[in-house]
Image (cartoon, helix red, strand yellow):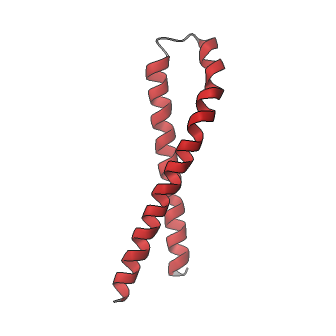
Amino acid sequence: MTSKMKNIVLTSAISLISFVINFLIFTYSYNKLATPYLNEEQRVENADFIMSNTLLLFVTSAVIIGIMFYLFIKNKASQNKL
């Protein structure tokens, strides 16, 4: 596997891990905050609204972290060549 391909795979893996962590944090926080105040019907009604507003932010966060790691890896690889 080429160095560029390794960087892409590593960056994709880091982005996926970041997305999963963000999603788990959201789920835990939502359950902790909403459960005492909403009944089950209200939680189900609000779930689409909450996910539609936050899912894009989670994907954006994962992509930004992935880009940061890709740039870090690229910079590190160029320093190793020197």
Q: Position of residue 7 (x, y in %)?
A: 50, 72
Which part of the image, by quadrant, shows the C terminus?
bottom left
| Res. 79 image quadrant | bottom left
Identified at 39% across, 76% down, the residue is 75
Q: Position of residue 70 (x, y in %)?
A: 46, 67
The image shows residue 22 at horizontal and vertical percentages of: 47, 42
Asked where in the image residue 81 lies, by quadrant, the reply is bottom left
In the figure, 56 relative to 43: above or below?
Answer: below
- Residue at position x 59%, y 34% in the image: 53
Picture layout, residue 31 above or below residue 2: above
- Horizontal side, residue 53 vs residue 25: left or right: right
- The image quadrant of residue 42 is top right
Q: Which residue: 55% across, 79% down?
A: 1
On screen, residue 28 above or below 2: above
Q: Position of residue 25 (x, y in %)?
A: 45, 36
How many numbered circles does the render carry?
0
Residue 62, above or below 80:
above
Q: Nearer the viewer, residue 32 or 58?
A: 58
